[in-house]
Image (cartoon, helix red, strand yellow):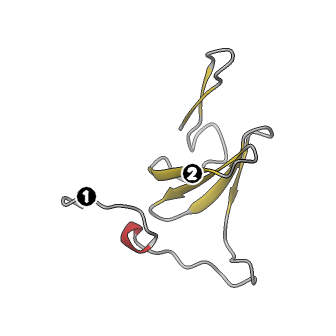
């Protein structure tokens, strides 16, 4: 994942080897409007705190139940015809 700092033009690259990123295969990124990004991979949902530069894997829903891994098609993420 690459983060571009708009004011400086500086690019920061994150991957499994240099950060807490749980997967190098990202399918969707959505801003939460509060200096954070929600990121979906095939096996994980995680949150990136932009200011703190930290990843947090989401393992439980709001009621404390374990989050089950689901294929991208069941997460509302578009899947193309080839897969």
Tag 2 near tag 1, CB within 8 Å: no
Residue 77 relative to residue 6: left or right: left
Q: Residue at x 69, y 17 (%)?
A: 7
Q: Residues within 10 Å of mark 2 (few under 14, many from 20)?
A: few
Q: Helix or strand or loop: what does disc 1 sit on?
A: loop
Residue 74 in percent (x, y) is at: 41, 75
Q: Residue at x 57, y 51 (%)?
A: 30
In the image, farthest residue toward the front? 33
Q: Residue at x 67, y 71 (%)?
A: 59
> Which residue in the structure is indicated by mark 2?
30
Q: Quadrant of residue 12?
A: top right
Tell me the distance, in whole angstroms, between the alpha carbons under discs 2 and 1.
Answer: 19 Å
In the image, farthest residue toward the right? 52
Where 61 sits versus 79, above or below? below
In the image, farthest residue toward the left? 82
Residue 28 in percent (x, y) is at: 48, 53
Please tell me the numbered disc located at residue 1.
none
Residue 61 in percent (x, y) is at: 68, 77
Where 51 sits versus 73, above or below? above
> Which residue in the structure is indicated by mark 1?
80
Q: Residues within 10 Å of mark 1 (few under 14, many from 20)?
A: few
Q: Helix or strand or loop: what does disc 2 sit on?
A: strand
Residue 19 relative to residue 42: left or right: right
Q: Residue at x 61, y 16 (%)?
A: 9
Where 16 sits versus 46, above or below? above
Q: Earlier in the sequence, mark 2 or mark 1?
A: 2
Q: Quadrant of residue 71?
A: bottom left
Q: Quadrant of the C terminus?
A: bottom left
Residue 80 in percent (x, y) is at: 25, 58
Q: Nearer the viewer, residue 66 or 9?
A: 9
Where 47 sits versus 6, above or below? below
Q: Nearer the viewer, residue 33 or 36?
A: 33
């Amino acid at each position: 994942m690459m983060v571009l700092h708009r004011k400086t033009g500086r690019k920061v690259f994150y991957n499994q080897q240099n950060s807490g990123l749980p997967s190098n295969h990202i399918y969707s990124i959505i801003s939460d409007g509060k200096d954070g990004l929600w990121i979906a991979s095939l096996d994980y949902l995680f949150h990136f705190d932009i200011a703190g530069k930290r990843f947090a894997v989401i393992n439980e829903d709001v009621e404390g139940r374990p989050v089950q891994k689901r294929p991208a098609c069941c997460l509302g993420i578009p899947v193309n015809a080839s897969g």
